[in-house]
Amino acid sequence: MFSDLLGIAPQVLFGQLLLGLINGSFYAVLSLGLAVIFGLLNIVNFAHGALYMLGAFAAWLLGKYLHIDYWGALILAPLIVGFIGVVLDRFLLRRLAGVDHLYGLLLTFGLAMLIEGLFVKMFGASGQPFAAPKALNGGVNLGFMFLPYYRAWVVVASLVVCAVTWYVFERTKIGAYLRAGTENPKLLQAFGVNVPLLTTLAYGYGVALAAFAGVLAAPITQVNPLMGSNLIIVVFAVVVIGGMGSIMGAIVTGLSMGVVEGLTKVFWPEASSTIIFIVMAIVLVLRPAGLFGRTN
Amino acid sequence: MKFLKNFMVGVSVLALSAGAAQAEISDGVVKIGVLTDMSGTYSDVAGPGTVTAAEMAIEDFGGTVAGAPIEVVSADHQNKADVAANKAREWGDTQQVDAFAELVTTSVAMAVFEVAKQQNKIALVSGAASSPLTNDACIPSGLHWTYNTRALAVGTGSAIVKEGGDSWYFLTADYAFGESLQRDVTAVVEAGGGKVLGASKHPFPASDFSSFVLQAQASGAKIIGLANAGGDTINAIKAANEFGIVSAGQKIAGLLVFLSDVHALGLETAQGLLMTASFYWDLNDETRAWSQRFYERTGKMPTGVQAGVYSSVTHYLKAIEATGTDDTDTVVAKMREMPVDDFFAQNGVLRSDGRMVHDMYLAEVKSPEESTGPWDYLKIVRVIPGEEAYGPLSESTCPTK
């Protein structure tokens, strides 16, 4: 068998594949948010990692001070952080509409450093413990590995959110407006559609997706000010591989890169933090627009 | 503003001191540069708390030594050796810094050792843990204060082997420190008749440990040794709990666990964990008094690394006071001659290989029921005599010992 040939027990291999899928769901939700934002606002949102972290912190703060449980936080935190995103867009990003990508990148990168620095100062770098909801404690033995219920829930929740987003953007009228807004905003405006409102809401939604992923991640890692900066570069690589702005590309690439990374952890653990960048380099050489991107 | 004020004080003292009593103090000021991780993975273990500790040491010393003012400057080295080396070089060349302190992360400490050697400055290492710092990589003015990987191995490693933990699998941070810790623990495990079944090297820092934890589980080892620190240890312990490793019978051995890690994990998750500590705030009246003062300034109880900075800076200042000079060779000789006696170490000895030998503590993390208040986290299981923890000088491979 394939796995035996490589000297790895099948149990280990299946376990790592499943874990890869779990990590991949985080990549998928995060890169989805980035793809939405890039697609509609043409902004390379480097603050995405910081907003993901804000989602986790919002959940933690809601629990600590308002005694709102995990499920409440899973709804509220993305709404709150999404609103912060709307404010950021209205007051900062809006001013950069129409100028080079680089300015948006620099602004969001600066914002990310500011937010993260502030949270390290306030909460320290070790992070805050955040318990998984009681209903999802424990796990099930699959024979080849022990699958914690919480991780299974992460995969399900991520896939549902990805599917809904894809449906809204690709199959509904709002989605059609949004896509039209990226192609030719002036023409769409001429038809009486409020394009600035549309893009602001899209940014808010992309940010809310990041916050949603942050709440999902909170019980797995600590609620840590640096949790986003560790992840964001990888997620950007995922978006580049999938094709900037491609919704389906972000989802499929996110999941598959999780699996690729999981496999690398078995065969060559030291390379697990670089493998995605190697894939990115290869994709850029062979298909510069990304696997799902369209070349203009 | 504070910097400016300090600077002005420094300048005026410099002007006054020409030809005066402080002639022996170079530039008329004793300046200590705290180089630490201010914002990354190790910033709770070391970080701003070590700057506070250095400031406390200077205040407690009265603000002057041998008639010259004492100053502290600090910088964030971001756990990057090149950043640290550049900063140290700049401090030494242009800002009259006499000693580099703290230096968490082995690669940083080694890079700063190189600068300290070239500039003939003193390096007071607290946070970096690798034992090579006083072995192959030693320098005459590099002093390793708080702990090292050998002491951690002797403490936690041998205690676990004695309890029957004779087969090990390591999760190792993929850089000099992780390797050094794994090597030292492997030696202890094998000396105790145990064996090491394998190891996974994980990137530093890593956030997801589930894959590595599953590989450790598949190895069938009784003990999963965590040769990492700070955020990595926290995440690894969390993953091990989540994936039912502990309830399935394997044990986790945190080889370098700090009070700040226990605080972040919470007692529910961390209870029962064995750890080797260089310091604990609740050892005696002296440690409680100092830690309380530290707590009032920072809102946190100190880690061993932070207490170690206070101790090393104080000892350094004592040697300058005693000799009346800040000349590196004279001060280091005096530091070796005097025993280290403060709340951190009793009868500590600074050896010629740079190792400060002092007692260590094997501690167990309390259960939530045992803990009587905030920060009441550890019970001391055993005091490990300094000689046992650090080994005899004859074992040191430092060429200049």
Image (tube, coloured by chain):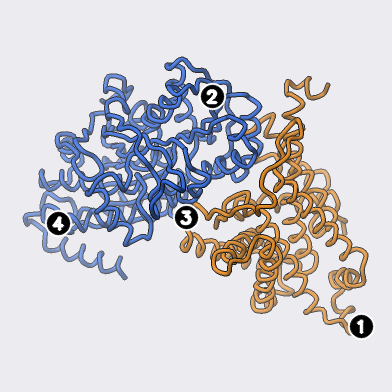
Percent x, y of residue B158: 41, 24
| Mark whose residue sits in front, 1 or 3 | 3
Residue density around tag 3, few if under 14, some if 14–19, many if 20 or more, within 10 Å: many
Which sits in the foreground, B323 or A225? A225
Q: Quadrant of residue B354?
A: top left
Residue B86 visible here: no
Percent x, y of residue B326: 17, 46
**Residue position for label 1:** A191
Residue density around tag 2, few if under 14, some if 14–19, many if 20 or more, within 10 Å: many
**Residue position for label 2:** B168
Q: Chain of mark 1?
A: A
| Mark whose residue sits in front, 2 or 4 | 2
Kind of residue at disc 1: Phe
Q: Residue at coordinates 33% horizontally, 30% vertically from top-left? A: B134
Q: Residue at coordinates 70% horizontally, 39% vertically from top-left? A: A275
- Which chain shows up in blue? B
Residue B251 visible here: yes
**Residue position for label 4:** B68
User: Pointers 2 and 4 in contact (CB under 8 A)?
Assistant: no
Which color is chain A depicted in? orange
Percent x, y of residue B264: 49, 51
Q: Are marks 1 and 2 on the same chain?
A: no
